Structure formats: C-alpha cells, structure tokens
Amino acid sequence: MRLAERMSRLGTETAFEALARAKALEAEGRSIVFLGIGEPDFETPAHIVEAAKDALDAGYTHYTPSPGLPEVREAIAADLGRRLDWEVPASRVIVTPGAKPVMFFTILALAEAGDEVIYPDPGFPIYESMIRFAGATPVPMRLHEELGFNPDAGEIGRLLSPRTKLIIVNSPNNPCGSVMPEESLGRIADMANEADAVVLSDEIYKDFHFEGPHVSITRFPGMRERTVLLDGLSKSYAMTGWRIGYGVFPEELVEPVTRLMTNSVSCTAAFVQRAAVLALGAPQDTVRAMVAEFRERRGVLVDGLNAIPGISCTMPEGAFYAFPNITRTGLSSQAFETGALQEAGVSLLSGTAFGSFGEGYVRISFANSAEAIREALRRIGAWLASR
C-alpha cells in the first residue's frame, strides 16, 4: 500500500509510546513508577459524572450543531468572560472533541506551503507535526532555561518574516512548566500586530498556576481580533478521556473551522457537552484542591531532583511538569529515558520528545502521588549512583 506523501511529515506524541513501553514491562511483572503521561491522576468530580448520566437519560445521544450546542457555547463564553474580563461572543466559540482539533483546524485553515509558523521548542510535539503536515515551514522559538524556559524577545523578532502566518504560544508550558511573563506576552502581541500574524494561544493549563494569576495574551491591544484561544476541560477537571475542548476564534475563522469540524468529526458528544455546562458553572473547589495537591508534589519532586548528583531542576511555575537538566550525568536525554525505565523502573520522557532544544533535559510529570514521586526519586538516585 502506498501512503500519501504527506503522511511522512506527520509525527506523533511520544508520551503514548513511552506509556506503552512502560505498560509492557509492567505486564512482565516489573514494578514501574509512571511519571511520563500528562494526565491528572484524579477522578473526574462526581457532580460532573452525574451531569453526564442525567444528560444521557434526557436523550442527549444525537448529533449537535458542528460548533456545539448553543447553551454550551454560551456557558464557555460566560466562563471566559469572568476569567478574562472580556465579553466573549458565544458565536466565536467552537466546541471540539478534545483540544487538539483546535490546533489541527487552526493550522490547516491558515498555513500552507510557503508559509512559516513560529512555535515553542521545547514544546508540545503536535505543533511541529501539524505544521509540517499542512506543508508549512516550522520555525522553532527556543525556550531558554536561563530565562525561566521562556523565549528571548530579540530572537523572536529575528524569526519573524513576511512569510510568518502564525505564532504559537503556550503558557503555562508543556513540557517546561514555565509561565511567560506579562511583559514577554506583550512584546509578542506587538510583534504579531506589526507582522499581521495570527496567534494560537494554548492555555489548556491556565488553572495550574503556582505563582500568581494567569495572564492571557488576549488582554493586549489588537489581540482579541487575531488570537485563537485554545482551552478545554481535560486537565482542570480530570476529564482527559471525555474528549472536550474548545477554541475562541477570530470571526474570519469561525466558518472555515466549523466546516473542518463538519468534514472531520461532525460534532462533540452531546452528553459530554452538557456535562461541561455544570463543570464550568459549579463551584470550583475540586479544581482548587487538585492544584493545591500538585503544588505540594511539585516541591517534593524538585527538592528531590536537586538532591541527586548530576541533576539540577528549576521550580516550575505552572502545569504539572518538571524539566530537569541532566547534562552533568553524561547521558543524552534519550539514554536517560531508556535507563530510567529499564534500570530504575521509572517512566519519564526525553526532552527531545519536545524538540531539538530539549536535549539535555527530561520531562517528569508530578501527576502521581507524593509517595510514588519519592519512590521514583529513590530509584533514579540509586541507578545513577550505580553507573
């Protein structure tokens, strides 16, 4: 069978491959500590589960309009309005099965051969994968450890060209756990306005802030008209398997992206959409409790990593990942990932799974219990000491 050439340009998300390898070892009887997958280890709150059951009983088992049920789009717009101090038009909200389609559809609708897309590196691997798949040229925006894993504004300016169609920002960042300073967001906003480029702002980790409130690039002049805001319920409400995300799109993109929805997935599951209304409108106590638990685990992980010879780790300000520097161990990122799994029984990810600038680092998720994190640290320390 001869695949289309474009399939050679489509990458993958290494976290799922690493998870499969770790699960295979576990099936052989090995004890594995899982710190690789980017998924909260909490159950979906009971009131959201009950809302989904009620929706099923009420007959929400059929197609919905491609951009989402009107009441759901309105609930999302109202929630964003409270957060962003912006009267978000519900007509600009499109509900998607998970947040990834917002990336897919935005890049497919905007980028083609001859265009350039600037994206964070280290960054979520699907950015680069989809840019290449669309035929455009990916332009990595390096995140520097010495800048708190944030980009250098001068470097961004040099990356811009007349071919720049889209700039992707992600704060809090996966994999680094970094939060982009307000001043840096403002400078990117100025550059986007000057270059007439669209910004895709991935804010899926907006609730996972450990040092201060979330700042969206949409707060800066001109950005509400040229920003695609990507968000969803997967992380904040431990709903990864429910597959519900959403985007707020500039008016010019609403109709094209709706067509992409119709041509690809038709719509997002109706009962899941109904549950989202309650999730957003109910008291957010469960979200705050989860974030507080992650804050405690963050301290356990970072302190423990910094106590291991050869490893240094800055304190992540958001998301639920640490991105330690492992260069002094003498191992490459991939060798560290392989050794940690095979020798120590700890599943984590090579920094190069998130781009070439991830060499010298690994990503460790603290979406596991403090007890499991301590055991993983003990195992990694013992493995490195025995080399």
Image (tube, grey):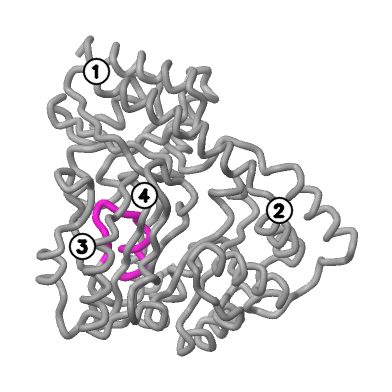
Dot 1 alpha-carbon crowd within 10 angstroms: few under 14, some 14 to 19, many 20 or more: some
Residue at (24%, 31%) from the top-left corner?
Answer: 313
Give residue 71's quadrant in the image. Answer: bottom right
Real-space CA distance between mark 3 and mark 2, rounded to the nearest whole angstrom: 39 Å
**Front disc: 3 or 4:** 4
C-alpha distance separating marks 1 and 2: 43 Å
Q: Nearer the viewer, residue 47 or 40?
A: 47
Say which mark, if any, is on residue 308.
Answer: 1
At label 3, which amino acid type do we have? Pro
Residue 282 is tagged as 2
Residue type (three-letter) at the residue carrying disc 2? Ala
Residue 178 in picture, x, y percent from top left = 31, 47
For label 3, the residue is 140
N-term-proximal mark, 4 vs 1: 4
Disc 2 is placed on an element classified as: loop
Q: Which residue is mark 4?
A: 174
Viewer-side label of 1, 3: 1
Rendered residue at 48%/34% (across/down): 294
The three-letter code of the residue at mark 4 reads Asn
Q: Which residues are magenta?
A: 119-132
Sooner in the amino-acid sequence: mark 1 or mark 3: 3
**Which of the pair 340/173 is nearer the observer?**
173
Quarter where residue 278 is shown: bottom right
